[in-house]
């Protein structure tokens, strides 16, 4: 499998890397396993100092790292800086809060003393995607390292420079080298890694098929997994919504990372009375986005990460149109084999069409007509995915009530869906299971140990001898 930096804007291979052999990989696993025994004994204060230093380094290197993302996967450099800053924020967050999140929990029982202890489990293997090459990794690594675990990173094969840069940040921050290592390996070695007894858990962000395969292997080995998979997020617009704000935010939500985000809004479910006006307004906002060289500060969206991804998205659109969908906004590829994909909108989307059933990982807005609010919730839930959703209405209380009925890991009322270190992140149904971020995220990969100390038995008092 090729491990190389392919620039999707220029079409050039920037750099190639030699894949690690199994013997090299296995040696790193051994080093990580030995490091885990030592790292778990360090104090939270010590770990926090190093994690704060990692945050400082991320901020210091943000321009360099943003450029790396632009070159390797086409992210506009402005967005890349924002991603690195978010990573730094998350490192600081866990440095500040890990000790409290993992403090012993006293439980009242008949014992003298009983509590739950949250203890590290050892090596956590992370299998990460290319679309947010720093953020996806840091949101696993920061809590894992602060919990006393060690991390092995198998990154996507098209972002090796980002993967190596992440390892260097943690090493330069002072973390012992074996506590965080990047493995430049192909997918062929992943199964062997999961089967290694020294690897105690796996976290994966990626596609539904990849998640199913990793979960099956981990299940056979009886190992904990956290899966953050695909999404086809619903963006519900009720008739009483602020339509201008909803349409503007809808365009932003669809164009996150050139449309290549699990939590980018993809299905726009609009009540019939405002459907035509919403389409018109959203179309205007989509057309205002500026494409261009990801290294240009003025660029708002770049190419998709690889030409084959654009080819696949084109095929999904063409098949959907043949199945009855209508193109409301023409865009897409200029020709096959190119990575730039201009925004599109599809309406008249019905069950049975690819646009209705599948995730479209790129800037294609799928418009669905709802008869009323109840119908909108039905349409939102009529998906095998359940990652995020948003609801737009001027009645906040009603929005909250409807949010409780949406089958998703996160629902935002009058806001686009986003992730932040304070709130748990993850999905239901085919979008995966488990949670990242917040106090829930750091507790995914710890041993929640029950400790029971029995009451002391007092010896009987000796009888007084007369």
Image (tube, rainbow, N blue to C red):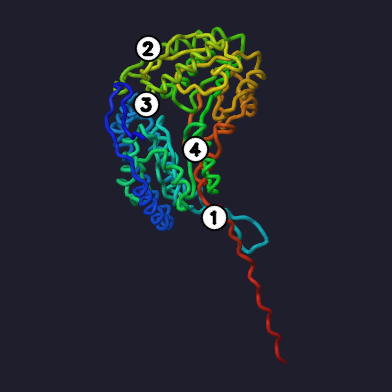
Residue that label 1 marks:
117
Q: Are marks 3 and 4 in contact (CB under 8 Å)?
A: no
CA–CA distance in space, label 4 to label 1: 22 Å
Residue 12 location, quadrant: top left
Labels 2 and 4: the sequence-earlier one: 2
Labels 2 and 3: the sequence-earlier one: 3
Labels 3 and 1: the sequence-earlier one: 3
Residue at left 33%, top 50%?
177
CA–CA distance in space, label 2 to label 3: 24 Å
Residue 42 location, quadrant: bottom left
Estimate how packed mark 1 is, as few (under 14), some (14 to 19) or many (20 or more) residues with alpha carbons within 10 Å: some
Residue that label 2 marks:
334
Of the two numbered discs 2 and 4 in the rendering, the one whose residue sits closer to the viewer = 2
Could you say where residue 186 lies in the image, as x and y percent from the top left?
39, 38
Residue that label 4 marks:
422
CA–CA distance in space, label 2 to label 4: 41 Å
Residue 437 or residue 20, whichever sits in front: 20
């Amino acid at each position: 499998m090729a491990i190389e930096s392919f620039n999707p804007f220029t079409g050039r291979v920037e750099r190639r890397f030699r894949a690690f052999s199994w013997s090299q990989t296995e040696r790193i696993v051994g080093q990580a396993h030995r490091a885990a025994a030592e790292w778990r004994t360090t104090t939270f204060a010590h770990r926090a100092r190093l994690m704060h230093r990692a945050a400082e380094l991320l901020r210091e290197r943000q321009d360099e790292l943003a450029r790396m993302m632009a070159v390797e996967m086409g992210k506009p450099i402005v967005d890349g800086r924002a991603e690195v800053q978010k990573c730094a924020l998350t490192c600081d967050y866990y440095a500040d809060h890990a000790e409290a999140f993992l403090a012993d929990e006293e439980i009242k029982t008949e014992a003298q003393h009983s509590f739950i202890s949250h203890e590290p489990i050892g090596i956590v293997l992370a299998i990460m995607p290319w679309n947010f090459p720093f953020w996806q990794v840091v949101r696993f690594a920061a809590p894992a390292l602060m919990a006393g675990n060690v991390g092995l990173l198998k990154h996507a094969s098209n972002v090796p420079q980002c993967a190596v840069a992440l390892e260097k940040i943690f090493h330069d921050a002072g973390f012992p080298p074996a506590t965080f290592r990047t493995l430049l390996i192909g997918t062929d070695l992943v199964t062997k890694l999961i089967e290694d007894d020294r690897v105690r858990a796996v976290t994966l962000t990626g596609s539904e098929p990849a998640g199913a395969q990793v979960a099956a292997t981990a299940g056979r080995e009886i190992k904990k997994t956290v899966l953050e998979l695909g999404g086809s997020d619903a963006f519900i617009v009720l008739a009483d919504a602020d339509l201008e704000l909803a349409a503007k935010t809808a365009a932003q939500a669809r164009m996150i990372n050139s449309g290549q985000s699990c939590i980018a809004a993809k299905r726009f479910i609009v009540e019939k009375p405002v459907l035509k006006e919403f389409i018109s307004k959203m179309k205007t906002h989509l057309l205002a986005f500026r494409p261009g060289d990801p290294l240009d500060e003025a660029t708002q969206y770049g190419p998709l990460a690889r030409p084959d991804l654009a080819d696949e998205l084109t095929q999904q659109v063409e098949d959907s149109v043949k199945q009855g969908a209508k193109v409301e906004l023409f865009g897409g590829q200029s020709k096959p084999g190119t990575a730039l994909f201009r925004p599109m909108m599809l309406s008249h989307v019905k069950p049975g069409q690819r646009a209705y059933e599948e995730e479209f990982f790129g800037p294609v807005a799928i418009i669905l007509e709802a008869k009323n609010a109840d119908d909108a919730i039905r349409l939102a839930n009529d998906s095998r995915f359940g990652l995020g959703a948003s609801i737009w209405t001027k009645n906040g209380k009603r929005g909250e009530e409807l949010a409780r009925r949406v089958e998703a890991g996160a629902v935002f009322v009058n806001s686009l869906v986003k992730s932040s270190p304070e709130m748990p992140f993850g999905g239901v149904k085919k979008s995966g299971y488990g949670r990242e971020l917040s106090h829930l995220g750091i507790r995914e990969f710890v041993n929640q140990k029950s400790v029971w100390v029995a009451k002391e038995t007092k010896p009987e008092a000796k009888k007084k001898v007369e």
